[in-house]
Amino acid sequence: MVMVTKVPPRPSPARGALRVLLATGLAAGSLAVVPGTARAEDAKPGGTTLTVAVSQSIDSLSPFLAQKLTSTSIHRLAYEYLTNYDPKDAHTVPGLATSWKSSPDKLTWTYTIRKDSTWSDGQRATAEDAAWTFTKMMTDPNAATANGSFTANFAEVTAPDPQTLVIRLKKPQATMTALDVPIVPKHVWEKVTDFSKFNNDKTFPIVGNGPFVITDFKVDQYIKLKPNKKFWRGAPKFDELVFKYYKDGDAAVAALQKGEVSFVPNLTPAQAAALKTQKNIKVNDAPGRRFYALATNPGAKAQDGKTFGNGNKALLDPEVRKALFLAVDRATLVDKVFQGHAVEGEGYIPPRFGSYFWKPEARSCGRTTRRGRRRSSTPPDTGRTRPASGSARTADRWSSGSCVTPPTRTTRRSASTSRSGGASSASV
């Protein structure tokens, strides 16, 4: 996946000057503006505005209802979460919580809430806001629409004091340092009567405690944000951030060429190639974190003995699966379909995650690459035949004797191509 950016021209003698726009942290299929890493010149004197083109409409500005990527990405900018992710290797880092610990049995988690987080209306953000957010999701099915899976296993959430949040679980839960739930201000949201209908898009600015504050929104047109001057990490360096909606990628690229937007994500290889030759546009390919894969569904047996899957019984034969995967010419897919903006799948984790990337040892099976060299990258024959669900994006372990390069971000019985173009950016 590729992205591109362009700075709108300035109505001044310095219009032709080259300025670099850094697209740091924008991964394949995601929108994540990191404060201070990008800058674009605005037409009005003394102001800086970054305008990002998006081709996905916003389903809701309510954190309890929003499920589309554009919407949840904007909530990342407007609200704090208990924890966040390090941009280099995605390990857990502090967010609204500065530290956390669990009981020995992993059933009780205690979070220390930071003292310096302030809602944009001036009130302090406390553990009570977090406790109210989670409890509301536990007690109101409508409030659990978007993120209810995170709290389904919660037994009780309390705030003994403004800096302490305690979550008690029914059974151990793996996501306790990665609860992707926006924390909302209790004093604002406790007035909402029907969470199934409240889209949070009538009154502006919207109260939040993230790096930006949502100031305006028009359905299928735009959403505008301004820096939160009270943000604990410091206000972003833009005077305004705008996400502008376009019906498709071609319309967004046209807007980029006209100088109407600063940044366009998700370019096709053809669009990226065409834009590379244009003046004042910089196309930047960065490693991706998504994949395309072919997975088989021969059926499986769960630990309790129950069977599932409805694939053809012939797929139970490792030799059949091997033949299917060897028949996929991934080198040609990379060269012709993605025009070089991809790499062959190799390991369970995408190469961009260097701290976690692992490439299994090769075992010769007589495979010849397009360069005429014999090569193989497959795990040892373990004899296991447990399948995936059949989805091309479902984690699936490699079956014995598959003799193909393991895919990026997939496991058994699938042949994949990992897109290397995670972000293409262009600038003036």
Image (spheres, helix red, strand yellow):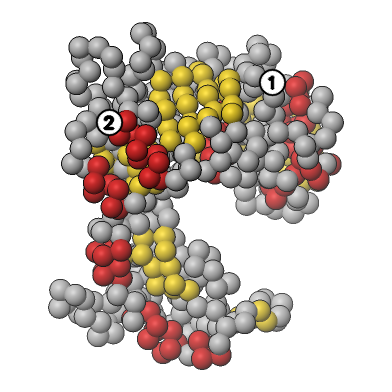
Query: Where does residue 153 sit, x and y in percent of width and height?
Result: 75, 50
Query: Where does residue 199 sit, x and y in percent of width and height?
Result: 71, 33
Query: Where does residue 414 sit, x and y in percent of width and height?
Result: 44, 73
Q: Choose between 118 and 212: the one closer to the eye.
A: 212
Q: Amino acid under label 1?
A: Thr
Query: Where does residue 235 sit, x and y in percent of width and height?
Result: 48, 17
Q: Quadrant of residue 62?
A: top right
How many labels, in total?
A: 2
Q: Residue furthest top?
A: 46
Q: Amino acid under label 2?
A: Ser
Q: CA distance from mark 1 to mark 2?
A: 34 Å
Residue at image x 25%, y 85%?
366
Task: For label 1, count other residues whose C-alpha is less than 10 Å away and answer few (under 14), some (14-19) or many (20+).
Answer: few
Q: For residue 411, which numbered disc appears in the image? A: none
Residue at image x 82%, y 35%?
194
- Whichever of callouts 1 and 2 sits on the residue coming sooner in the sequence is 1
Q: Choose between 301 and 242: the one closer to the eye.
A: 242
Task: For label 2, count other residues whose C-alpha is less than 10 Å away and answer few (under 14), some (14-19) or many (20+).
Answer: many
Residue 346 visible in image = yes
The answer to whether 175 appears left or right of 383 in the picture is right
- From the image, tell me which residue sits under label 1: 203
Residue at image x 51%, y 91%?
314
The answer to whether 120 appears left or right of 370 in the picture is right
Q: Under tag 2, what secondary structure?
A: loop
- From the image, tell me which residue sits under label 2: 427
Cβ atoms under marks 1 and 2 closer than 8 Å: no
